Amino acid sequence: MFKFNFSAADLEFDDPELANTQDDNQLEDLSKPLESLSVSSPSLVPASQLDLQSKSCTSSLPLTLHYELAQIPVLTQGSDATTAIATDTKTGKEKEVITIYKRNLEDVKFQIAQEDDEFDDKNDTAPAHSTSEAANQGGARTGPGGVEMLALAGKSDLVKGVYEGGLKTWECALDLVAYLAEQKGSYDDKKVLELGCGSALPGIYVLTQSSSVKVDLQDYNDQVLKLVTLPNVLLNTHVRPDQQPDEEVEEEVEDDKKKTADGADDNDEGEDEDDEDEDDVPEADPADGDFMGVELDLPDSDEDRLKLMQKVEEQTKFYMGDWSELVDLFAFKSDEDKYDLILTSETIYAEESHQKLYDTIKNSLKRSGKALVAAKTFYFGVGGDILSFRRLIEKDGAFDVKVVFSAQAFVRREVLELTFKA
């Protein structure tokens, strides 16, 4: 079992300044040794495309999504559609931020636990020979929600070949979004891939910038794609909370119609008292960092969910499994079929995976394209670092590589740009 050790608990980033700072109380963790090492080498998950229209995908979406905002400071002032003005809680100054909706991590954990309880109950009453069949239908090793993943997510940031840290949102993903926002590039008709996407904030940012861009998302675990990536895509595209009808306004209209039909309302005084009581409870405002009770209802019928998945597939494909088989799965027929832009963040933590990641980038990128790799300069307890990855790139000699972004912290963070040599 591997651990990043340097990490904060869940890195939910209620305060955008957390993207550029690290608490001093984390310094003690940096000296901790590797807690345990799995001597077994589990079989790797084969690369495959996730079928969004399958029952396992549509049913994995809960009836209600609990969400929050990732607010990422813009490096330079701009006017993108996804930016907003926020007030710095420390200085009181206004600043421009990128706003991306993301599913609440506790909501994910709750769903995983709930589904595993249902799976256990089902297997307690099922014949012995049907247990493996039920597990296969659920799409996970130990149940439809992956109880193994739930336990691991709470104890470790990485378990080789089982869980690759996709439930959490890491700092370098925010760095990559900030850098992309600064560049203000045009993504019209572009083809983009995010490797090891997890919560997929960089890919989702690009997806929101153009109606003609194609953004494909890949993660090792299918459970991460179903429970985190897909909900995050929906929250920022086809079911954006800020584009939903105002339920309070609709209720007021219905009340007015009812009063008109029934005549004078005899209970005005009582209703006024109820309204006063409701006014005493402030509403949750994600922009103020208050995420309690911020939720969004999803369609509950199979037909409506299928239509929603069809809309997602118009711009986005989801891939799961190990990088070693990904290029074969893509089956590019020519350079034009490849990606204009490849994004990845926090994926070089294990040096043994560098070659697979590099080969995937090299064989999936157009000659005229570029790749952006966001990472910490060193990953304590795991062994990966930017220098080793750069040496691999430079030894191969196919790319020019340069640092295009750097954030100073106890462990410095950088974004590398890879472009094919002329």
Image: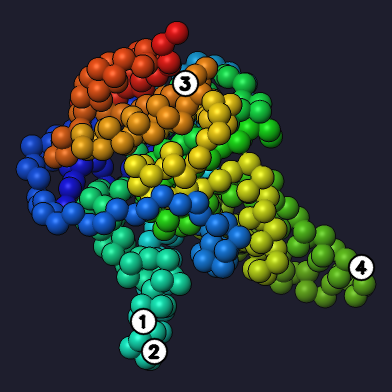
N-term mark: 1 or 4: 1
Instruction: Give percent across and percent down for residue 134.
Output: 42, 78
Q: Are the two marked residues, 2 and 4, in contact with CB atoms closer than 8 angstroms?
A: no
| Above or below for 309 versus 118 | above
Quadrant where the C terminus is found in the figure:
top left
* CA neighbours of label 1 inside 10 A, class few (<14), some (14 to 19), many (20+): some
Residue identified by numbered label 1? 131
Q: Earlier in the sequence, mark 4 or mark 3?
A: 4
What is the quadrant of residue 388 in the picture?
top left
**Circle 4 sits in a helix, a strand or a loop, which is it?**
helix
Contact between marks 4 and 3 (CB within 8 A): the answer is no
Asked whether the beta carbons under mark 1 and mark 4 sit within 8 Å of each other, the answer is no
Q: Amino acid at mark 3?
A: Lys
Find residue 370 and name its label.
3
Gap between marks 2 and 4 measured at Cα? 56 Å
Residue displayed at 68% across by 33% down? 212
Disc 2, disc 1: CB below 8 Å? Answer: yes
Position of residue 288 in the picture relative to residue 154 (left or right): right
Residue at 49 percent across and 35 percent down: it is 193
Q: Tag 1: residue type?
A: Thr
* Residue marked by disc 2: 126
Tell me how far mark 3 sits from mark 2, CA to CA: 52 Å
Q: Nearer the viewer, residue 97 or 412?
A: 412
Give the residue drawn at x 36%, y 77%: 132
Q: Amino acid at mark 2?
A: Ala
Q: CA distance from mark 1 to mark 3?
A: 46 Å
- Residue at numbered disc 4: 260
Decide if residue 214 is on the left or right side of residue 28: right
- CA distance for labels 4 and 3: 62 Å
Cα–Cα gap, marks 1 and 4: 59 Å
